[in-house]
């Protein structure tokens, strides 16, 4: 089974670590890392660690795009990216004194011809794969119906889509005719989407019953270290993970998407699928690298995730 991950606005993630950060002065960096970044590429890395057959697509341009492509080759991920004239972006994190200061470029503007090129190639790609994940925001130049178009194309090929985005883009996509198979908002994103306060579990469960999610088979609402509430069609589940020391929780949401994608590719259902999906988020938080898990700990983690069906009323 081949899984296609979509990252339309990827970046080179640059991490600078230093003891002190001095404004209006020279800061010399001794510890630096550069990796192919973007939510969908985090998904790709975890899927690769799980032994899945992975292809990745989106837009890439310039020398930074070449760097990202070289990283894909190194990881053994099939490169389905579409070239553009613009330059892919940097996202810089300065880690200092227990803090993290981020400097994020907005990225290139996608031209109409490049958009059409991507849509044409995506139509070809979905015929070659069995499952699609779509993650993150849109680069400039694309309209809010772009994910809707991708989901519609995938649906015409009976290919399920796991969608991880937020805000107006998620709202617009859910109003489309074609629906994603799974969405994964966190509690804050769910509250923002429905424009209401969600202060407790009952509020979240009530929100998950919204008509906005009709025909979305899986709604996974992640709650950080508290686990998740999951709705599969008309059945609601509460999932509680084991208590672990979180080394780096960044990318745990992306890892959950990877877990559900890999679980579906292996034929997992219901509680087993939920445990497998959430286990990847837990394992990512235990690692220093973003979008990274230790496969040897999967069985332990799944055994210690508690999943129970809960009544949701009328």
Image (cartoon, rainbow, N blue to C red):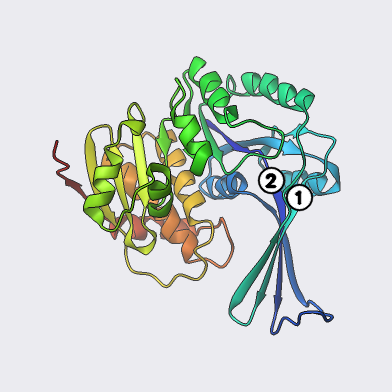
Residue at 38%, 53% in the rendered image: 187
- Of helix, strand and loop, which one carries label 1? strand
Is residue 302 shown above or below 242?
A: above
Tell whether label 1 touches label 2 (CB within 8 Å): yes
Q: In which quarter of the image is the C terminus?
A: top left
Q: How crowded is mark 2: few (under 14 residues within 10 Å), some or many (20 or more)?
A: many
Q: Can residue 277 be seen in this view?
A: no
Q: Could you tell whether 186 is left or right of 142 in the image?
A: left
Task: Tell me residue 97's x, y (percent).
Answer: 62, 82
Which quadrant of the figure has residue 31?
Answer: bottom right
Instruction: Give the mark, 2 or 1, whose residue is nearer the N terminus.
Output: 2
Q: Name the residue under label 1.
A: 89
Q: How crowded is mark 1: few (under 14 residues within 10 Å), some or many (20 or more)?
A: many
Task: Tell me residue 58's x, y (percent).
Answer: 68, 36
Residue at 72%, 34% in the rendered image: 141
- Of helix, strand and loop, which one carries label 2? loop
Q: Could you tell whether 167 is left or right of 221 in the image?
A: right
Residue at 34%, 48% in the rendered image: 196
Q: Mark 2 points at which residue?
A: 10
Is residue 234 shown above or below 208?
A: above
Q: Could you tell whether 220 is left or right of 67 in the image?
A: left
Residue at 77%, 38% in the rendered image: 109
């Amino acid at each position: 089974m081949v899984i296609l991950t979509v990252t339309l606005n990827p970046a080179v993630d640059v991490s600078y670590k230093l003891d002190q950060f001095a404004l209006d002065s020279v800061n010399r960096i001794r510890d630096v890392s550069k990796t192919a970044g973007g939510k969908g590429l985090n998904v790709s890395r975890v899927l690769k660690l799980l032994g899945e057959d992975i292809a990745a697509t989106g837009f890439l341009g310039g020398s930074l795009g070449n760097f990202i492509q070289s990283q894909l080759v190194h990881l053994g991920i099939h490169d389905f990216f579409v070239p553009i004239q613009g330059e892919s972006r940097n996202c810089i994190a300065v880690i200092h004194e227990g803090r993290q200061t981020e400097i994020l470029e907005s990225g290139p503007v996608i031209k109409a011809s490049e958009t059409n090129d991507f849509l044409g190639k995506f139509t070809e790609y979905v015929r070659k794969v069995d499952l699609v994940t779509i993650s993150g925001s849109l680069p400039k130049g694309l309209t809010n119906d772009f994910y809707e178009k991708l989901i519609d194309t995938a649906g015409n090929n009976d290919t399920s889509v796991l969608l991880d985005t937020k805000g107006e883009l998620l709202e617009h996509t859910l109003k489309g005719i074609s629906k994603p198979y799974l969405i994964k908002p966190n509690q804050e994103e769910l509250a923002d989407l429905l424009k209401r306060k969600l202060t407790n579990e009952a509020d979240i469960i009530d929100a998950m019953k919204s008509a906005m999610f009709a025909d979305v088979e899986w709604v996974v609402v992640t709650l950080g270290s508290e686990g998740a509430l999951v709705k599969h069609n008309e059945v609601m589940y509460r999932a509680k993970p084991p208590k672990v020391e979180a080394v780096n929780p960044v990318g745990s949401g992306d890892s959950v998407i990877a877990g559900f994608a890999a679980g579906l590719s292996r034929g997992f259902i219901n509680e087993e699928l939920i445990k497998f999906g959430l286990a990847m988020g837990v394992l990512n938080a235990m690692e220093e690298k973003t979008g990274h898990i230790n496969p040897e700990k999967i069985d332990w983690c799944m055994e210690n995730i508690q999943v129970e069906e809960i009544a949701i009323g009328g």
